[in-house]
Every structure is written in C-alpha cells, then in structure tokens.
Image: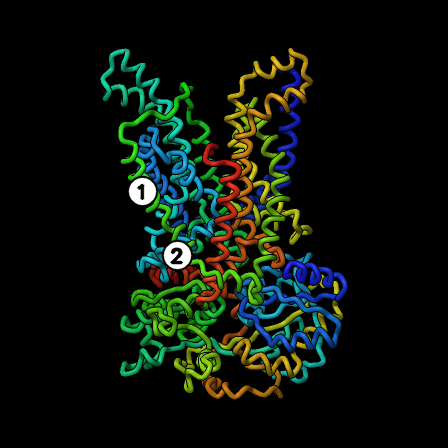
Amino acid sequence: MGGRGKQETRVLGALLLSFLAFALFYPLARILLLGLGTGFWEALGNPYYLGRYLFSLQYGLLSALLTLALAFPLAFLFRFRFPGREALLALSTLPFVLPTPVVALAFMALLGPRGLLGVDLYGTLALLLLVALFYNLGLALRVLVPVALRLRGALEAARVLGATPYRAFFRVGLPLLLPALGSAGLLVFIYAFSAFGVPLLLGGGRYATLEVEVYTLLAHRLAFAEAAALTLLQLFTLALAALLYLRLPTYPLPPGGPEPVGRPWALTLGLSAFFLLLYAPLLALFLEVDPGALARAWASEDFTPLPVALGNSLRFTLLAFSLALPLGVAYAGAARERGGLDLLGLFPLMVSPVAVGLGYLLAYPSLRGSLALLLAAYALLAYPLLARALLPALRSLPKSLLEAARVLGATPLRAFLRVELPLLLPALASGSALALAAILGEFGASLVLWRPEWTTLTLAIYERLGRPGEGPYREALALAALLALLSGLLFYLLDRGRGRIG
Amino acid sequence: MLRILAVLVFLAFGLAQEITVLTHSSFSLDKALIARFERETGLKLRFLKGGDAGETLNRAILTKGAPIADVIYGFDNTFLSRALEADILLPYRSPEIRNLKATLLLDPTFRALPVDYGWVSLNYDRAYFKGRPLPQAPKDLARPEYARLLVVQNPATSSPGLAFLMATVARFGEDGYLDFWAALRDGGVRVAKGWSEAYYTHFTLYKGDRPLVVSYTTSPAAEVYYSEGKYQEPPTGNLFPELSFFQVEFVGILKGTKNLEGAKKVVDWFLSRPVQENLPTEMWMYPARRDAKLPEVFRFAPEPVGSVRLDPVVMAKNRERWIEEWTKVVLQGQSPEAVRRARR
C-alpha cells in the first residue's frame, strides 16, 4: 500500500476539507464572529435561555437513560435465535430514518388532542420522551446487539479460567459492554439534545430545545446575535459529547452469531408485543389516513400540491445524494488510515441544521435563496451517516486481499472494483439508505433556507399543520403516511436492517 | 393528466411575465378577480405563502438582495418599522393613494401602502356563556374563574398574539402590563403558538375547552358567513373594545424586483375597488379605500369604539423587549418585579 495509500488519503482529505470549509467552517465562523458581540453574553446571562439549555440537557440525558434502560435487556434477548428476530431488529431501526414531522403526526394520531386513544399527551414531557425512545431504541440496539452477540467467547474464556457466572459477567462482560453502552447513550444524547422537529411540533411552546429556540429567534424575531450565542452553546456541548464518543475504547471481540434458544415462540410473542406497543403510533398514522385527503392534497389550491412537493423531494434528494456519496466515500477512505480525521467526519452531526442554515444566510448573502445552498446543507448533513456506516466495513477489510489481487496482476482500479467494492457494497447500501432518508426527511435547514417554490414533502406537511382545522390536518396525515412509506421503502430496499450506525 | 398540466404551466411560466407576491398564509382572494387581472395585464400572478405575517416579512428580509418575490403583502403596523429599517422596499406613489383613508398612511416615504385594517380582539363563545356571567372589565380576565377559560397566542410566534400583547401594554402601561400577565399566568391562561391553533384547537366553538380566545372583531361575522345558513346570528361575540388593538396591513414592492412596472400594477390592483370590496369576506379586514362598500355580513362586525393603538415608533423601539419580558413572566414564571428590575 505504502505511498499510494498515503497520497490517496491526502487527496481525499483535501476534497473533504474544501467542502467542509465552504459548507461548514466559514458559515460557522460568521456565526462565531456575530455571536461574540454583546448579544452573546446577554443571551448567556438570560435565565430564559439558560432554562432552554438546561431543558435540552435534561431531555438529552433522560432520553439516553430511558433508551438504555430498555435497550440493555433487549440486546440480551436479541442474542437468541428466534423467528422474526431480523425483522424486529429492522423494524426498530425504521423510526431512525422517519422524518420528524411524520413521527410528530404519528404520535398525535395516537396520543394527541384528536388521537385514537382519547388520551391527550400533547405538550407534555412524557410524550417527548416517548418520541425519543421511539426514535432511538433501534439506534441503541444497533450498537449494543453486535457486542452482546460477541460476549459469549469472552465469558466462556473467563468460565474456563474458573470464574463463577456472576463473576464472569461483572468482571469480564460488563467492562466489555461499557464502551458500547456509553457510545449508544452518547449518540442518543446527541440526537435528543439537538432535536428540532419533534419539540417544535409537539412541545406546545413549553418544552423547547435550544434548537427550537434558535429557529424562533431567527425566523420570527430576526435576533441574529442571540441565535448565534445559543448556536455556540449548543456546538460546545455537542462537541464535548462527540469527543467523549470518539474517546471510548473499542475492544476487539471474536465474531459471534445468534445463540439457539429453547422456547423461541415465547420470545417472538413477547418481543413482538413490545415492539407493536412501541411502534403503535405508526400504525395509528396509517389507520387515520383518509384517501379523500390524499386526493385533496394532490390538487390542493391552498397549499403546495402533492405532485409538486413530491417532485421537489425526489429531485433534491437525488441531487444532494450525488454530492453526499463522493463526500461520504472520501471521508471514509481518508479516515480509514487516520483515526484523527474522525472528529471532522462527526462535525456536521454536532452542528444543528438550523444553525447551518443560519450560517449560510450570513456567509453567502449573494447566494441567498439559491438551490446550491440547500443542496450543500443536505449533503453536509447526510454524508456523515453514509461514512459512519461505511467505515467499519472498510476498516475490517483485510489489506492482504487487495495486495494479493495486485500481486496476481490486477491494476489498482481493477483490484478496487473487483475485490474491494463487492465486499463493501452491503455497507455502502445501508449507508446510502440512511443518507437518502435523512435528506428526504430533512426539516431544520429546509425551514431556514426554504423558498416557497421548493416546498418538499416535509415542508408541505409543516405548511398544512400551521393551519389546523380538520381538513389540513387530514391532508398532513396523508402526506406523512406517504413520506413514511417512501423512507421505509428506501430503507427496506437498501438496508434490510443489516447496516450499522454510529 | 395533472402532470401534463404541470408541465404546460411550467412552460407557460417562461412565456407569460410572472409576478410573485409574497403573503402570509391566511391570504385569500376571489379567483375570478385574479383571472381578470391576468387577462387584462398579460401578467401571471403567483402567490407565495410565507407563514405567519412576521415570519413572512423575515423571509423577505433574509433573502434581501436575491428577493423571492416582486411584491410583499400582509406585514402589519407592529412590524412596519422592521420592514422599513431592513430597507427591502422601493417607494411607490400609487395613483390610488388619494382614494385611501388618510389615517392609514403611516409611512410617509410611500414604501409601505395600506391595503386593509382591522382589530385584534377577544372573542367569546355565546353558547358557553349562556346563563353564565361574562367578565365585566379587562382586569376580570386575570381572575382565576376567567383566566382558565382563555387561550392567547405566543407574541413571539404570532402576529395577533403580538397585537394583543401590545393592547395590554397600551391599556395597563409599562408598569402594569406585566402584573396583568402574571395574574393571567397564575390563573391558568393557555398559550398557543399561532392563531389557528388557538381558534381551531382550543376554542370551545371548535370542540376545545377554552370559551375565550384572542381573535379579530370580524371573526363573529365570518362565522355567520361561512355557516351556510346554520347561524342567523353570530355564535361568538367580541369583548372589551378597550382591549382591541388596531392593525393595518401593508403592501410594498420588493427591492431587486426584475419587473418594476408589473409590480406597480399589482400594487395598484390591491388598492383598486374590486379587490378592496373583495377583501372583507376573504381576509376579514376592513378595506383601506374610502369608497369601498362593505358586504352585508359586516353589520355583525361594527368597528370597536375606544380601541387602543400605539405609535409605530414606540412599537419599533420596544417590541423586542416586550416580547422578551412577556416570555420571562408568562412562559418562565418569573415575577414582574424581577423583570422590571432587570430593565435597569
């Protein structure tokens, strides 16, 4: 590999860096400059904003604890082989790719003022925590299940060396699990702390995260200085969480498959019931869809008609993905050799989409309202998801394989295409599914950079929700179901639950 | 079929000159009127809805330099100063100005021209209050037995909410308005994000649990108009003219328009008699033209006597602080004294 590998890494790194400079660092620097004025200290000294910050922290922490409390025992149940195991694991990851307005509507269809259950949890912390669980349980399982599967070898070794089962678990199993627990918890924290669509649509004004506050300050009040200050506060917090996440050790564990189990049907039934309960909101969403509303949304005169919104969504998703794909591959390629690049790849996940949008408006006044900015934002937010899925596969690829191909006379390109790429395809497909779904459902940056004629499906839902009354609400439900189907289909076609996030 | 139509429409965009009007999401006008304008001028009108009135204006400000529209309609007097300071509008002395009510001409530079006006006011559900006493004075609203019946809008995210906040400032003064709001808060007032959420979700007329809502003096008339014969008399009524807030909505040409002549035609059209006489039953505001006739149903929407208004300059200077102070008291539960102390 030697020289060629290093040079490749350098080129890929430069490609990525120049994009990040345009799409992330420069806009953020503009916010930094603006935010460091007097408004910054005023905003930080304001108990109201401090309260929003504390709430974001609380929401992130509670969500992480709640998710871990359920994911931990579940991960152990998923060690066993039972019918429907793969399907349930796939189902648990589905919410992660569902757009926030869809999830918000799904919960309203079940637990809102007009909900099926007749229990109105709108505007309560309990509802927000339930949504966080719904969103992140699958994410936590994706991190924890593979580790749980690989524990057996280590535990058996401990037993062979004479440890009691109890002692083996606490002295060997738990320490091996701790990093996985930590990384799952930190990921959930990062996502919940910076949640936007869900608290905006379901928080009822009382429970707003910093992200929602940044949006309100910008869109309704044009208070740039305060918005910038809060963005910085958020960035520092998330950077800290991301640093911790990257610092967590990973232990090499022998690969392990699911273990056989005595009474698989009890497990199937129990877990199915649990997941059904957890994902009931999605079911409620589809139950509430009225075909007439879909027809009305199709030819709507008051709101963006469905064909236009759908066309925009598909067009933007494809365009942005064609940008995110090379970026994600470039980053994964560069980070494979150098671990230090990791933070760079995580950076876009730390910056709130709303702040990215705000930064663009500040940094590129002449491009305001141009499609390039929106696509750059989409690509920026999507490529880390693609790269994080690709990276483990790339790192586990034995180098000797490629070298063998070269020794046998293959050109570098041919060796890559015929040997490496086929091995990477599953990871690439599942990363692409995540990236595509993320772009399809993007909400925060769209809301800031939006031009009315670019209304996407996500924004078309928000548009209708802004005008309650039965009619628009029904149309929003129908659009949400459609968007959920689209994301679900994408996810099913490309991933089928086998990929990893994180 | 629709897709073919969409393609045709798209092709037509390139041929006919298009004028884009940025408006708030409650915008609505008779389609026949729009079609007639397009026929007579050869211009194609497109309306972009930008959300709440304040949000819409901010969209225009944030896209200054590369405007997303040619004309903006619907920002009101509480935001007039922001529109003028942001310098996003071109001056235009429309020939129709002489037909407008002089009291509405709040911008001497003619960048913002008044289109319509109205009052934000408290509405109550008549059926709910049948046999129950209504609050007698604005101060009564703060008593627990009424505060728990009231839903208002967040002034940070809603223009009627902001107008109502300003009404309380005008009514109770800088020292008193926070005490009033603290009492409403303690009494259990509910805060909704915007008008439609308050009216269609929380108001008892639409199966909510709050029979008092911040809305418009024309809302009772609108209920009769849309009821298709169900109501002969309004099912709702207005409360407290002394807590009603005067609102004017403006139109302006956005700087950077590629079609100044077309944009001027659109402004003239907004101020023309046919549009002005259509406004009341579409947007539920009163026409700015002196000679516009009001529709019959407006007998249920008499102009309130003794309503409050504030000087646009005073509003411009204090708007942000009032919103912040309101947020501290109502949403965060701080005491009015603490908030007043923090002013110094």
Q: Quadrant of the N terminus of chain A?
A: top right
The foreground one among B169 and B157 is B157
Question: Where is B36 relative to A291, above or below?
Answer: below
Horizontally, residue A203 falls left or right of residue A451, namely left
Question: Where is B280 relative to A484, above or below?
Answer: below
Residue A100: where, in percent of width, then height? 46, 50
User: Callout 2: helix, strand or loop?
Assistant: helix
Type of residue at label 2?
A: Met
Quadrant of res B234 = bottom left
- Binning the other alpha carbons within 10 Å of mark 1 as few (below 14), some (14 to 19) or many (20 upward) gives few
- Binning the other alpha carbons within 10 Å of mark 2 as few (below 14), some (14 to 19) or many (20 upward) gives many
Horizontally, residue A435 falls left or right of residue B148, namely right
Residue A72 in view of the camera: yes
Q: Nearer the viewer, mark 2 or mark 1?
A: 1
Residue A239: where, in percent of width, then height? 48, 36
Q: Are marks 2 and 1 on the same chain?
A: yes
Type of residue at label 1?
A: Phe
Quadrant of res B213 = bottom left
User: Callout 1: helix, strand or loop?
Assistant: helix
Tell me the residue that label 2 is attached to.
A108
Residue A155: where, in percent of width, then height? 31, 19
Residue at image point 60% right, 17% down: A402
Protein chain holding label 2 = A
The foreground one among A368 and A178 is A178
Tell me the residue that label 1 is attached to.
A274
- State how far apart marks 2 and 1 are (Cα): 20 Å
Check residue A393 in the rendering and tell me which mark sits there, or answer none: none
Task: Point out the tag, 2 or 1, that comes first from the N-terminus.
Answer: 2
Residue at image point 35% right, 48% down: A130
Residue B130: where, in percent of width, then height? 30, 82
